[in-house]
Image (tube, helix red, strand yellow):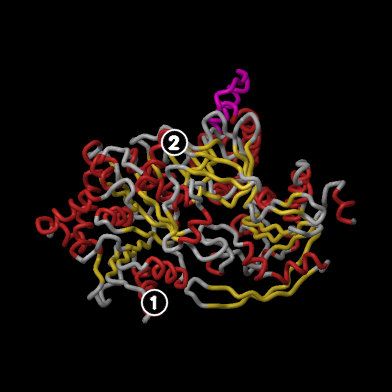
Amino acid sequence: MANDRPAELQSIPALLARNAVKWGALPAFREKEFGIWQSWTWAEAQAEIRAMALGFLALGLERGDHVAIIGRNRPALYWSMVAAEMCGAVPVPLYQDAVAEEMAYVLDHCGARFVVCGDQEQVDKVLEVQEGLEGKDLRLHHIAYLDKRGMRKYDHSHMNALADIAAEGRAAEQRLGAELDKRIAELTYDSTCVMLYTSGTTGKPKGVVLSNRNIIETAKNSSEFDHLRHTDDVLAYLPMAWVGDFIFSVGQAYWTGFTVNCPESDSTVRTCLREIGPSYYFAPPRVFEGLLTDVTIRMEDAGRFKQWLYRHYMAVARRVGPALLDGKEVGFGDRLAYWLGGVFVYGPLKDSLGLGRLRVAYTAGEAIGPEIFDFYRSLGINLKQLYGQTEASVFITQQPDGEVRSDTVGVPSPGVEVKIGENGEVYYRSPGTFVEYYNNPESTASTKDAEGWVATGDAGFFEEGSGHLRIIDRAKDVGKMADGSLFAPKYVENKLKFYPNILEAVVFGAGRDRCTAFINIDLTAVGNWAERNNIAYASYQELSQHPQVLETVAGHVEEVNKSVAADPMLAGCQIHRFLILHKELDADDGEMTRTRKVRRKVIEEKFADLIDALYGGKDSIYTETEVTYEDGRKGAIKATLTIRDAKIVAGQERMAAE
């Protein structure tokens, strides 16, 4: 494909050079460290990145080398990605919470020669992996680390602090500057920009190769779609290995010139969100669910007058808020009531959540419950859904302003074509379509055809009239009940997760006569309830089986059944029996991906005894489950779980009996 964009805009390093000239004195990155926000302008960021790149050259970084980056969101780690590309190398960000086995697979698969680590913990994991793969084809040449704490007594023959590498790079400007400029000039629109690994929901993660064309075209089109500008602020807190973080914190940031803000730690994200007050924000549904859970808990602890005020004005918000946000006609009385609600409730609430300055917010990754989605829209927050995947450089569909609904994912993004296959599977092609799966031509060919159409693995359809895409579920998860009715588990799971007490749910029923469910309680919400009611508990396991907790969750399940029954196409998905799991589903135990997607096959195999009990009519089941602790040790949880029946809506009892 021809290079159809000016040379100064054909790579991320080229965009960096443009930004340093165009917005050189404006903030590019901020980071909170030791409780203080530090800032770097675009000109300062360019100088730091160039110094790093020169330091990498001095260490022998070659064209085509893979550079693994592991750590939390920090400006220097983002800079190391761009510095690697400047050298003609390929940055490969990894999930910082990956266990040794996952990290070993990625490092070995991509053949990383250089690794940039955030701190001692990540260095230790890399060294452990290196020793474990001794004799195999793991060609680590050098390890760099950002945080010097705890690193003084390590063997530094093949290890250096990132700051020292940058200092060496500055000293080598005269010697290596020309070589670096040559390599930057070699970068084209079709040069590799980054390699990101899939979450591995159904198997081993695949390395998705994305070019400068993929990232820049997608960043340009999506930024123009939502009128993003250089004065915007974004909070960079999601895993750097996830494609969404890369497109927001690198692609769109370098295209538009907006400011990327990095929190101090995972535990201070909420505080930093309030301090920064981003104007552009992305969060997966679990984050919006968590924020709503916090609001619910706070209101339960509030005085009677505040509770009345909240309930009264939230009723107004639900009635007229979305219409006002979409620019529709609303009567004077409702406008006045909503304005008063903004003074007394919505404004303070949004400010306390850190969402007061938002112009555009997105959620994706999993479908969000419609009740949760509508809650934020009713507050006047321009929350939208998008549909995408790693192989598309994120964006496949987006919701235009004025056409935002909870039951669709919008229309094809600019430059993207979408079609529905005969089997209902969604296909797309776009400038963001990935180049290939690294060292996996078979998977590349099975996913992307000769014309560039990519199979998403999701089932969906376009609505007549609106042209909006509706995603039903993962194509492999959508099935039939024993009587032939449609089975779409995610639809039901998202309704369950609307309730603050429910953190996660997994619904079963394909090929069976009825649906059942596993449920994870939200320890924060349920623990708060237990504290207010003087209920003592020693562990998650004990609280999950408390009779009142089971009764409360049963009520939630029955409410969901009423809602599901209202949809004739999915009425057969009502939940007949459920149990509350004795442990939270965990990525370390292989039950979820690092992006918090449920691995259904793993769960079905691991908890086969519990599923058999749900369908076997038992009232309880004893089980033992292996778990992985934070330090990597293995242990076991033993528990007797209560199984509850749930009421189903009239008309379904007859089907169940048959």
Secondary structure mostly taken by the magenta-highlighted segment of the chain: helix
Say which of marks 2 and 1 sits in front. 1
Residue 446 position (above or below residue 138): above
Residue 136 position (above or below residue 649): below
- Magenta region: 323-344
Amino acid, disc 2: Arg
Q: For this rendering, which residue is in front, 389 or 148?
A: 389
Q: For this rendering, which residue is in front, 241 or 444?
A: 444
Amino acid, disc 1: Glu
> Which disc is residue 357 wearing?
2
Whole-percent x and y of residue 272?
41, 48
Residue 358 position (above or below residue 117): above
Specify the farthest residue to the top: 332
Label 2, residues with CA under 10 Å away: few <14, some 14-19, many ≥20: some
Q: For this rendering, which residue is in front, 141 or 624?
A: 141
- In this picture, residue 598 sits left or right of residue 248: right
Note whether residue 353 is visible.
no
Note whether residue 475 is visible.
yes
Mark 2 → mark 1, Cα distance in angstroms = 44 Å
Residue at screen point 45% across, 54% down: 242
Asked if residue 122 lies in the magenta stretch, the reply is: no
> Which disc is residue 451 wearing?
none
**Quadrant for the C terminus in the image:** bottom right
Q: Secondary structure at mark 2?
A: loop
Q: Which residue is mark 1?
A: 128
Residue at screen point 49% across, 42% down: 352
